[in-house]
């Protein structure tokens, strides 16, 4: 993931966050929000920052402590942006949005959860360290209208398949979507997962859901 492929805004924010300069990063985000919409900042700046942080951690360029601090600060920045999102009226629809066991940080799914919440969904995100059993139990307890799964690394596709197979066998008949870096990189994993649908990015995902469930998405037309 060469840093040259990222915008100067995303690189500057990532540099501040990885160096532990949260107050300066927060000020920078506030300036970005003055110039652009919260949705554009989410998609064009925060999503690349999350990808950069994940790549650095995977390559060992962040220590465990640095990685934990960086992602904790990313979550604080996401919360700051969330305050600028204008939520649509509640849809009366519920989604369980789950990472899979082995996920490193879960920040990407949190960002997607923000977009769904803004569209009026009630969003339940199981804790990042949840086991397969906990994820299955969460779905059974909440009876969601949608299950969204994030698959970040290829080996998680087998975990997703076991979860989906168990839920289908026990009567869960609602829509199941799977996405994430591994699904985008290896499209054949989607078919193996037994999920119903996938989408390569957030904008298409939210627009597909609006069509599937019959509501008007707040995703701006220019994105």
Image (spheres, rainbow, N blue to C red):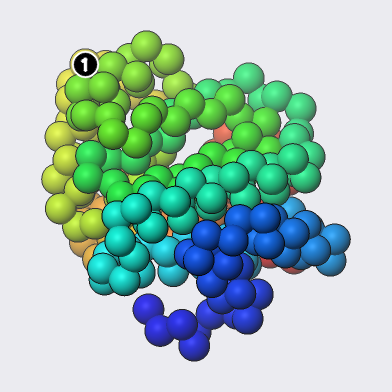
**Seen from this angle, which residue lies furthest top?**
141
Q: How far across and down, in percent of the image, does residue 137 sit?
A: 28, 17
Query: Residue 25 sits in which quadrant?
Result: bottom right
Q: Is residue 158 left or right of residue 178?
A: left
Report whether residue 183 is seen.
no
State the SS at label 1.
loop
Q: What residue sits 76% from the left and 27% below the top?
A: 89
Q: What residue sits 54% from the left and 50% below the top?
A: 73
Report whether residue 15 is seen.
yes
The correct choice, above or below, for 160 with respect to 69 in the image is above
**Seen from this angle, which residue lies furthest right?**
34
- Residue nearest the observer in this picture, 41 or 30: 30
The correct choice, above or below, for 12 with respect to 168 in the image is below
Q: How far across and down, in percent of the image, does residue 60 sit?
A: 26, 68
Q: How far across and down, in percent of the image, does residue 23 sit?
A: 67, 55
Give the labeled residue for mark 1. Answer: 170
Q: What residue sits 28% from the left and 34% below the top?
A: 129
Q: What residue sits 28% from the left and 29% below the top?
A: 130
Q: Quadrant of the N terminus?
A: bottom left
Query: Residue 181 sits in which quadrant?
Result: bottom left
Q: Is residue 91 left or right of residue 198?
A: right
- Residue nearest the observer in this picture, 134 or 105: 105
């Amino acid at each position: 993931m060469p840093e040259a492929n990222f915008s100067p805004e995303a690189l500057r924010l990532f540099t501040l966050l990885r160096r532990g300069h949260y107050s300066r990063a927060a000020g920078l985000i506030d300036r970005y929000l003055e110039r652009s919409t919260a949705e554009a900042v989410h998609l064009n700046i925060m999503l690349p920052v999350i990808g950069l942080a994940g790549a650095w951690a995977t390559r060992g360029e962040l220590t465990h402590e640095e990685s934990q601090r960086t992602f904790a600060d990313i979550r604080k920045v996401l919360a700051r942006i969330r305050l600028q999102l204008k939520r649509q009226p509640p849809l009366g629809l519920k989604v369980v949005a789950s990472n899979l066991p082995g996920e490193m940080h879960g920040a990407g799914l949190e960002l997607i959860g923000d977009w769904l919440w803004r569209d009026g969904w009630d969003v339940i995100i199981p804790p990042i360290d949840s086991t397969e059993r906990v994820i299955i139990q969460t779905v059974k307890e909440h009876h969601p209208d949608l299950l969204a799964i994030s698959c970040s690394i290829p080996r998680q596709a087998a975990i997703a398949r076991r979860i989906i197979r168990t839920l289908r066998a026990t009567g869960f008949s609602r829509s199941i979507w799977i996405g994430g870096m591994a699904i985008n990189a290896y499209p054949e994993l989607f078919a193996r997962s037994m999920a119903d649908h996938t989408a390569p990015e957030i904008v298409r995902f939210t627009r597909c859901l609006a069509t599937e469930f019959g509501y008007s998405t707040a995703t701006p037309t220019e994105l």
